[in-house]
């Protein structure tokens, strides 16, 4: 058995000292210490925290990493909050998941600093600057979430290593002719060595477990005694000699004269009584300083910035997983919209669904839009409405692509019509030449799929439909935000010239909800019929009935066998928010695609998919084609990269086997395509990692 401690912030003075303490003082050969710095674990990336903790499965997490730039935090609150407020909560969640305890370090800055007696753990918190507020958020997250935790509040830390007040004073004494230090802030300077020792005493580490020796909670851990920053600086000068020093004395200024951007607590003294009661005594600040300076005398000049020697650094750190799709929601805004529904008591059809239909019509410049519970039902509805309108017969044919999600052919079958497969072109969209070949006397419509947001040869297929009297059903599941150049030269949302266009707002689409869709008919009469069909043929929806006055609002007629296909206000509430970000999100998707393209351009064995001219793709997918697809997928999975395949040739499925062999391009593509990770949480370095992993495996195996 082994026990494992994960320590964050190893390049900070506290993390360094803790890692050192556990690495060197451990007499347990079964204890593994994994100390990570920011380059190995980025605390602004919850996904990374989760995957690293998940892979390491530590018995104890010590979070000594923090955003500590107190002044910079004033204008960098989001970053400070990510690191100090949000990351600790994620560590706590992950600690629970793997049964670990967590020790989280916090600060005296959670107090207002206007006290006159040492702060106890029971005293009210009232941080007075951004840094303190973010640290308090982290404390709250850990204490609410973690099952076994210690929050150790420390103050005025220093060490012979890394960056801190002690080392700064000694440096400035060499560089400056005078040095003034504030004397109206009081605290207890604390050597991180004493913090590390105290931390060690709070733990019981055995060969197969790490227990906390004290009940979960907050503990103050600082030196005893009180001085000012000036008093501390003077003691540092008095306790050291340095032949290069230009000054030995330290002048006095006030906090007001120093005039830093962030407000500092005037009184930072923490009471250690709770810790002492738990059996851990802290030394006075003078003794700590004396020992620290004694250690300093034995160190050479550069040792203070040397990296930590990690003899146990045997653990190969897993790289964070990169998933194909991870939707990003504007969470607070979505919750506010959903809250409105809950407060109003209206979560179903009407209200937000109407608001979103209007918003979508305005955004997409489409004349009609009806909100549904998915694109699949929209495609069925499209076929059903057009079938009734034009009197198509059961068994009549609709041409579609075999390289798509099975919704397309299924929905044709729902309407008792027959899907006929035509082949795809290089853009992986229907090829007008093959569509023309597949037209028979029974063909009534074409169901065109804008693969990955790309329009392919949509315009040519549409022209063919118009020439041959066929309806155009555009499956725009991937095309929310795809713009096509209209005849008037304007860029317009794809779908303006189809008989009916269907969008998906399913969980991983460009405009994600959980499950929802939109059907946009060209003709008003079709839209009207669709609205009745989506609510069981009822000819007035609930909203209209409630909005209508009088005694007869409960009265409605049922004119058709309908379906339960309409969307609801909760999904529409999310969609209303996400729509605001759609164009910006799609722009980032295009940047990611351009990054991928640039990475692959020199490698002819990695083939990218051509984009249609006159189309600004929503870039739902970024697909490549390689000869050894399955091998590439397997290798990427081993590298913790999880791409997808859109799609398998549908004629390979038993129920569409009748089409097998009729679409050779689609068949070939089906064996070659990979959809690479594409979502808004990808960083540029994630994309580089995917590019080099793909290039590595393809070049190694294919040799180009
Ligand atoms: C091309 C295509 N059409 C239709 C659909 C069905 O969409 P929904 O899940 O909203 O029913 C999808 C879903 O992935 C799709 O990719």
Image: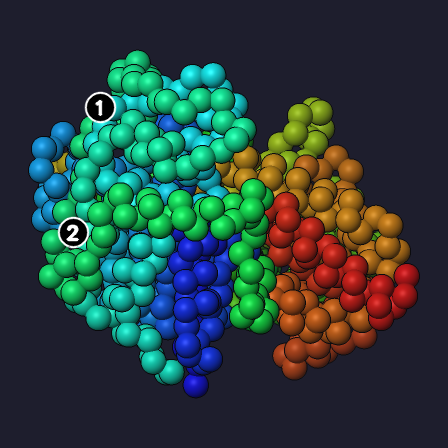
Residue at x 62% of width, y 64% of height: 641
Does residue 80 appear in this view? no
Disc 2 element? loop
Q: Residues within 10 Å of mark 1 (few under 14, many from 20)?
A: some
Q: Please tell me whether residue 17 is drawn above or below residue 175 in the rendered image.
A: below
Q: Which mark is residue 184?
A: 1
**Residue ID for mark 2:** 272
Q: List the single residue furthest toward the top.
A: 257
Question: Which of the two discs, 1 and 2, labels the residue nearer the N terminus?
Answer: 1
Is disc 1 in contact with disc 2, using a CB cutoff of under 8 Å?
A: no
Nearer to the camera, 135 or 704: 135
Label 2 beta carbon within 8 A of ligand 1: no
Q: Please tell me whether residue 579 is drawn above or below residue 400 in the rendered image.
A: above
Q: Quadrant of residue 213?
A: bottom left
Disc 1 element? loop
User: Which percent across, then down, holds residue 491?
Assistant: 65, 29
Residue at x 68% of width, y 37% of height: 616
User: Which percent across, then down, holds residue 386?
Assistant: 55, 53
Q: Which mark is residue 135?
A: none
Does residue 243 appear in this view? yes
Nearer to the camera, 579 or 499: 579
Q: List the single residue furthest toward the bottom.
A: 1
Nearer to the camera, 241 or 177: 241
User: Which percent across, then down, holds residue 151?
Assistant: 25, 55
Q: Is residue 357 left or right of residue 139?
A: right
Task: Tell me the quarter of the image containing the C terminus.
Answer: bottom right
Nearer to the camera, 231 or 378: 231
Q: List the single residue furthest toward the right.
A: 704
Q: Please tell me whether residue 284 is drawn above or below residue 209 in the rendered image.
A: above
Q: How many marks?
A: 2
Measured in 3D between alpha carbons, the distance from the residue under mark 1 to the one under mark 2, in whole angstroms, is 22 Å
Residue at x 48% of width, y 37% of height: 581
């Amino acid at each position: 058995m082994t026990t494992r401690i994960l320590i964050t912030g190893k390049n900070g003075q506290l993390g360094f000292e803790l890692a050192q303490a556990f690495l060197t003082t451990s007499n347990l050969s079964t204890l593994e210490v994994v100390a990570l710095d920011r380059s190995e674990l980025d605390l602004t990336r919850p996904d990374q925290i989760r995957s690293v903790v998940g892979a390491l499965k530590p018995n104890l997490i010590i979070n000594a990493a923090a955003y500590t730039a107190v002044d910079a935090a004033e204008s960098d609150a989001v970053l400070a909050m990510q690191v100090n407020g949000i990351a600790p909560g994620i560590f706590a969640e992950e600690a629970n998941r793997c049964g670990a305890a967590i020790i989280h370090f916090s600060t005296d800055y959670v107090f207002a600093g206007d006290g006159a007696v040492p702060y106890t753990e029971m005293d009210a918190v009232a941080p007075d600057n951004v840094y303190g507020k973010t640290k308090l958020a982290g404390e709250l997250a850990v204490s609410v979430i973690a099952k076994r935790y210690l929050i150790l509040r420390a103050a005025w830390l220093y060490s012979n290593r890394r960056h801190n007040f002690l080392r700064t004073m000694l440096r400035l004494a060499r560089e400056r002719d005078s040095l003034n230090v504030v004397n109206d802030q009081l605290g207890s300077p604390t050597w991180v060595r004493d913090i590390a020792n105290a931390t060690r005493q709070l733990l019981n580490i055995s060969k197969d477990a790490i227990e906390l020796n004290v009940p979960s909670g907050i503990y103050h851990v600082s030196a005893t005694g009180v001085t000012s920053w000036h008093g501390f600086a003077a003691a540092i000068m008095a306790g050291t000699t340095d032949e290069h020093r230009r000054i030995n004395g330290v002048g006095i200024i006030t906090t007001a004269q120093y005039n830093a951007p962030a407000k500092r607590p005037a009184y930072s003294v923490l009471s250690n009584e709770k810790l002492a009661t738990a059996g851990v005594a802290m030394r006075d600040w003078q003794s700590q300083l004396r020992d620290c300076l004694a250690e300093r005398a034995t160190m050479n000049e550069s040792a203070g910035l040397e990296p930590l020697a990690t003899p146990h650094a045997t653990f190969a750190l897993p790289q964070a997983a990169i998933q194909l799709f991870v939707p990003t929601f504007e969470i607070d805004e979505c919750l506010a919209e959903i809250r409105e529904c809950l407060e109003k008591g209206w979560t179903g059809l009407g209200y937000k669904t109407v608001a979103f239909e209007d918003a979508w019509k305005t955004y997409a410049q489409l004349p009609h839009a009806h909100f549904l519970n998915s694109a699949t039902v929209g495609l069925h509805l499209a076929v059903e409405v057009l079938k009734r309108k034009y009197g198509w017969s059961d068994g009549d044919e609709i041409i579609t692509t075999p390289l798509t999600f099975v919704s397309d052919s299924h929905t044709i079958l729902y309407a008792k019509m027959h899907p006929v497969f035509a082949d795809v072109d290089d853009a992986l969209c229907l090829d007008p030449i093959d569509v023309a070949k597949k037209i028979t006397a029974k063909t009534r419509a074409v169901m065109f799929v804008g693969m990955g947001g790309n329009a392919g040869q949509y315009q040519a297929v549409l022209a063919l439909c118009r020439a041959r009297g066929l309806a155009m059903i555009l499956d725009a599941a991937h095309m929310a935000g795809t713009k096509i150049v209209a005849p008037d030269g304007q860029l317009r949302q794809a779908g303006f010239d189809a008989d009916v266009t269907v969008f998906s707002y399913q969980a991983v689409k460009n405009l994600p909800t959980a499950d929802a869709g939109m059907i946009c008919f060209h003709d008003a009469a079709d839209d009207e019929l669709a609205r009745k069909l989506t609510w069981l043929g009822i000819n007035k929806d609930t909203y209209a009935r409630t909005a209508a006055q009088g005694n007869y609002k409960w009265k409605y007629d049922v004119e058709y066998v309908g379906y339960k296909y309409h969307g609801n206000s909760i999904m529409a509430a999310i969609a209303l928010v996400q729509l605001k970000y759609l164009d910006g999100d799609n722009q980032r998707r295009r940047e990611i695609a351009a990054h991928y393209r640039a990475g692959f351009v020199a490698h002819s064995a990695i083939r990218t998919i051509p984009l249609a001219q006159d189309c600004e793709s929503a870039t739902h997918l970024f697909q490549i084609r390689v000869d050894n697809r399955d091998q590439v997928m397997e290798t990427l999975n081993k590298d913790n990269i999880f791409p997808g395949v859109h799609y398998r040739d549908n004629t390979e499925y038993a129920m569409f086997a009748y089409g097998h062999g009729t679409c050779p391009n689609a068949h070939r593509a089906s064996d070659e395509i990979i959809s690479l990770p594409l979502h808004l949480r990808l960083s540029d370095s994630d994309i580089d990692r995917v590019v080099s992993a793909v290039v590595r495996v393809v070049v190694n195996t294919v040799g180009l």
